[in-house]
Image (tube, rainbow, N blue to C red):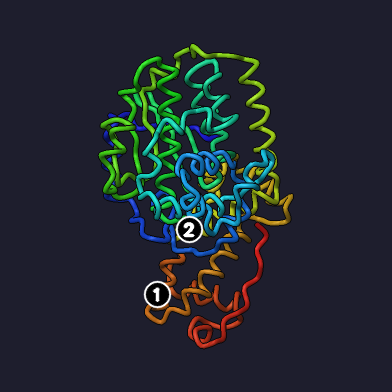
Amino acid sequence: MTRKRADKSGPASMAANSSGAQKHTAGGAASGGARDVADTSILEQLPMTSAYFRVALRHFGDSPDRREAILAGTGLTEESLRDPSVEINLLHQVRQTDNLVRLCGENWALHSPELWAPTVHGPLGVAAIAAPDFATMMETIARFSFVRAPFHTASLRLGKIWSQLEYDLTVPIEERLWRPLVEIIFVGIRSAIASMLAAPPSKTSFFFACAEPSHAREVRAVLGETVVYGASRNAIRFPSAWLSLASPFADARLHGIALAELQTAARRIEAPINLQGRVERLLSTLPIGRISADEVARLTGVSRRTLVRRLAQAGASYRQLVDAELRSRAERLLRDSSRSQAQIAEELGYADPTSFSRACRRWFGSGPAVRRSAPPERPKNRRR
């Protein structure tokens, strides 16, 4: 989990970042946007809890035809989902979400917000509610949120007046598909905050890194009036004074059990080889330019030193992964005749076309002009 200093301004100040937010279009993802990537193999490699899938199927699948429509294309069956040990991945969840959008509309996650109470979030919800105080609850959510929803990472930004929980999407998912999943997360956290306060969390603000949808009125009816769209990232802002509040549901034993389960799950995901895959996915979602090792470390919830060490254990380095991603993008962009060499160089973060030309000769054995006319290479499978 990463802690950062928060802005000292009021809860609506984040809306000022909307002018700098990247636009989200079909195929885009990540806070601030992402390039169009149609690689479903990325989603297949990410384990996903089946709880959200089962709840949505039971609630919205109130007839055989509707259940069939919700399961279409997922590869899952009602029989397989009855097995409590069944494992699904993010691709299953995304395909179900796509089906729900088509069947029920983009506001489907808000039809019955009570479905997304903390209990549906498994050990994460239990650890949050049983935490000794508000600060520990938010730290737990920030640290382990990706275990339950592997399409994002979270960080806690602390300030004197306002603090906020920030979410960065790390895989390429269309906005219409990630937005309801973020709505579910926000509904669950709002419920946890209300439980901790024993009162409606009226001073909480919710920020979405996307344009305002047609169902924004429903979102505000569920989350509260302070909902901001067009923000630089998905986030929840709350008064820092709440951090010192003791929880009325504090239970050290229950919190410890749930925390141990989350730590076990996190270790599986954060193993060196899995961390390499997470870094590769982060690099692939970057819309333009480059991302620093410090920022990648923040987004993966480890220190830069730990990032370097674990990548080395997996037989890789951050520089190698960046170079491989740049090479892959260059190969793709050079096929686009509408882009000039200078434009491609700028998009890849090179200072000038000459530097890009040198990189092309290192990658392909020839300059950009020659590479444009060469046949495409067969893609190499990345280790995810």
Element type at mark 1:
helix
Residue denoted by label 1: 342
Image quadrant holding the N terminus, namely top right
Q: Which amino acid does the dot numbered 1 rest on? A: Ala
Identify residue for label 2.
290
Residue situated in front as seen by the camera: 234 or 201: 201
Give the mark nearer the N terminus: 2 vs 1. Answer: 2
The amino acid at mark 2 is Arg
Q: Quadrant of residue 231?
A: top left
At a point 52% along the width and 35% down the height, the residue shown is 2
Q: Residues within 10 Å of mark 1 (few under 14, many from 20)?
A: some
Q: Is residue 185 visible?
A: yes
Q: Residues within 10 Å of mark 2 (few under 14, many from 20)?
A: some
Foreground of the two, 376 or 148: 148
Q: Residue at horizontal 41%, vertical 82%?
A: 337
The vertical placement of 227 against 22, above or below, is above
Could you say whether the residue bearing mark 2 is in a helix, strand or loop?
loop
